[in-house]
Amino acid sequence: MKNSHKPIFVVQKHKARTQHYDFRIEIGGMLVSWAVPKGPSTDPRLKRLAVRTGDHPLDWVDFEGVIPEGRPGAGTVIVWDRGSYRNILAFKDKSSHRSMEQSLEEGVIEIELDGEKLKGGYALIRTRRSYGRRENWLLVKMTDATADSSSDIREARPESIISGKTIEEIEG
Ligand code: MN
């Protein structure tokens, strides 16, 4: 019996000119990406700005290290979380069923993450506020059994899931 391919997601903490978290999910063979200045939360009350950025190739999922000066995104990157996801809207009834491509186009994505740190439902919702060609979205934890408003996962789990190092330790 063959395993069907589960689409992947990754969250890379990136210390460049400004520090942010790159939230990337596999859609159509690419990592569709958002820069989230404050990072993901496990608290459904917090809406986190997520600015759409350029798609990345799938093999970027494992990148951790230093991007040299002069290159786009120069700075330090750790793989903060990684895993697979499920498209929640793919399992809805016919009228609300959406593929990931449709969800991206319509600006409403609902996924269930199975990462090492992030678990359960997350929504990405495109806002009407945009600046020039910039697409602003909001990343929000959905209310479910994995929601937790009592702790800040960024502080509780700052380390890379690959090396166990923090971004400061990688910087040296
Ligand atoms: Mn980045």
Image (cartoon, helix red, strand yellow):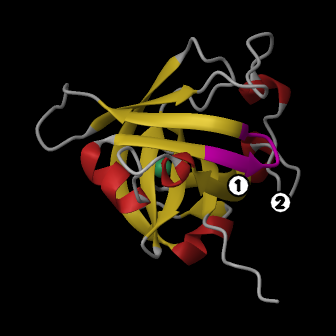
Q: Residue at x 61, y 66 (%)?
A: 7
**Rendering coords of residue 161 (x, y %):** 82, 53
Q: Residues within 10 Å of mark 1 (few under 14, many from 20)?
A: many
Q: CA distance from mark 2 to mark 1?
A: 7 Å
Q: Which residues are magenta?
A: 112-119
Secondary structure under the numbered disc 2 in the rendered image: loop
Camera-side residue of 70 and 152: 152
Q: Residue at x 60, y 27 (%)?
A: 141
Residue 79 is labelled as 1
Camera-side residue of 37 and 73: 37
**Rendering coords of residue 101 (x, y %):** 35, 61
Q: Residues within 10 Å of mark 2 (few under 14, many from 20)?
A: some
Say whether residue 47 is left or right of residue 151. Answer: left
Task: Give the image quarter of residue 157.
Answer: top right
Task: Give the image quarter of residue 102.
Answer: bottom left
Q: Residue at x 66, y 17 (%)?
A: 43
In this view, the residue farthest toward the right is 164
Secondary structure under the numbered disc 1 in the rendered image: strand
State yes or no: Cβ of the residue under disc 2 lies below 8 Å from any atom of ligand 1: no
Q: Residue at x 43, y 53 (%)?
A: 33
Residue under circle 2?
162
Residue 141 visible (yes or no):
yes
**Rendering coords of residue 162 (x, y %):** 83, 60
**What type is the residue that disc 1 sits on?**
Val
- The tag earlier along the polypeptide, 2 or 1, is 1
Residue 16 is a magenta residue? no
**What type is the residue that disc 2 sits on?**
Ile
Residue 113 is a magenta residue? yes
Q: How many marks?
A: 2
